Amino acid sequence: MTKSFFVFASIFINHVAATNIVIRMPRTNYRFPIEYISVEGNETLNGMASIDLLNDENVCLDYPRLDDEYPEEHQVRTILARGVLMGNEAVMLDFHRHLETSSSCSAIVPVGPGSQFARSVPSFILTPVSEAEHTLVLNPTSPSEHAFEGHILYTPLHVGHSVDSSRPFRGALRLAGGVGDLETPPLAELDLIPMGMSIRQSRIYHLPQTICSDLLGKIAALGIRASRFGDRFNLHDVTPDQVDLLPSIDIIVQSDDGSNLVQIGQIEPREYLFTTHTPNMYSFAGRGVDGFVLPRSIIGKLVVHFDYENNRIGFGDPLVEL
C-alpha cells in the first residue's frame, strides 16, 4: 500500500527571537532543509523549502504534484511540517496537501511584507556569500556587517492595498547608454512605479510599457525590424554588434527619507534580451501594467535587508565580488 500525507494549508510560525540565525542555500534554487513530522510524532520526512519574495499568502506546496483523484487504497494522514531547524531554533509551519511519503517533500514559504513569516521574523537578510551560495540571516544584530563598506540604502515600503503586496516598494527604470541620440533623463524627472523581487524567476525581465516604448524607438533607429506577439517583442535579423549598441536599463529606488533617487543596479542588453530558436532573432518581454519585478539575476548580486520592523527594504553590495 502506498502512503500519502494530507498536509494543512494554513501556516503557523513560532516567533524566532534568537539573532543571527544563518541558513545556507545554493544560488541555483535557494532551497534549504526542512523536516516534516507527523502529528502523531512517530514519523519524520526530510524535505526542502524555498522562500517566495513576491507572496504574502499562506505556505503552499511545490513538488510533487499529484493527480486530483487518489486511489482509495491510499492511506491519508495529517502531518505537521516542522520547519527550518537551525541549531536549537525552529520555524514551525503547517500545510494542506497530499504528499506521497516516498516522494521528496518540498514547500514554498512566502516572506512578503504581509506574510505570517514576516510577522514572526520581521528582520532578515538575503545575501550572496560566493558564486554558488546565498545565506538567509534571521534577525541580524548588525545588518551593515553583511554589506560592502557597511553601506545599505533603504527605501520605504508602500503596502496599503492587496494590489501592492507583491510590489511593495517604489522605484524607477530608465534607458542609459547605447549609441545614438538617446537622452538619459535625470533622476528627478523619473516616474516611480511599483516594484517587487523574485528569486523563483531566473532572468526574464518583464519590462513596463514605458520602457518597452522607449526601447522600441531605439531599436527602430538602429534599423532593426521588430514584431509583437502578445507581451513578447521579437527582434529579427539582429547581429551581435547591434545588440551591443542597445541601451542598458538603470534600476533606481527612492531613498528612505524620500529626498533622492539612487541607482542600485543596471541591466545590460544581453540580460534583458533572450535568444530564440530562430537564428539571429532576440526577444524581450513586456507587461500589461507599469510595474516591475527584479528577478533572481539581479537579486542574486545584492544584499537585501527586509526590515519590516521599520517598514523598509535595504539594498547593498555584497562582501564578496561576484
Image (tube, rainbow, N blue to C red):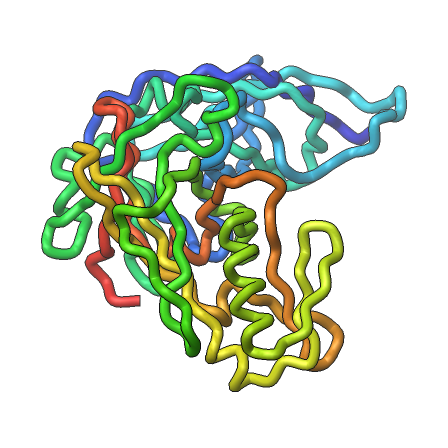
Residue 62 vs 236, above or below: the answer is: above
Residue drawn 23% across and 55% down?
Answer: 317
- Drawn side of residue 267 relative to residue 62, left or right: left
Residue drawn 52% across and 68% down?
Answer: 218
Whole-percent x, y for residue 206 in the image? 56, 50
156 or 316, which lies in front?
156
Residue 81 can be seen in this image = no
237 or 127, which lies in front?
237
- Drawn side of residue 292 relative to residue 38, left or right: left
Whole-percent x, y for residue 110 in the image? 48, 29
- Drawn side of residue 290 relative to residue 102, left or right: left
270 or 70, which lies in front?
270
Residue drawn 68% across and 56% down?
Answer: 232
Residue drawn 68% across and 73% down?
Answer: 225
Which image quarter holds the C terminus? bottom left
- Which quarter of the picture shows residue 83? top left
- Drawn side of residue 271 relative to residue 129, left or right: right
Whole-percent x, y for residue 238 in the image? 63, 80
Residue furthest toward the front? 181
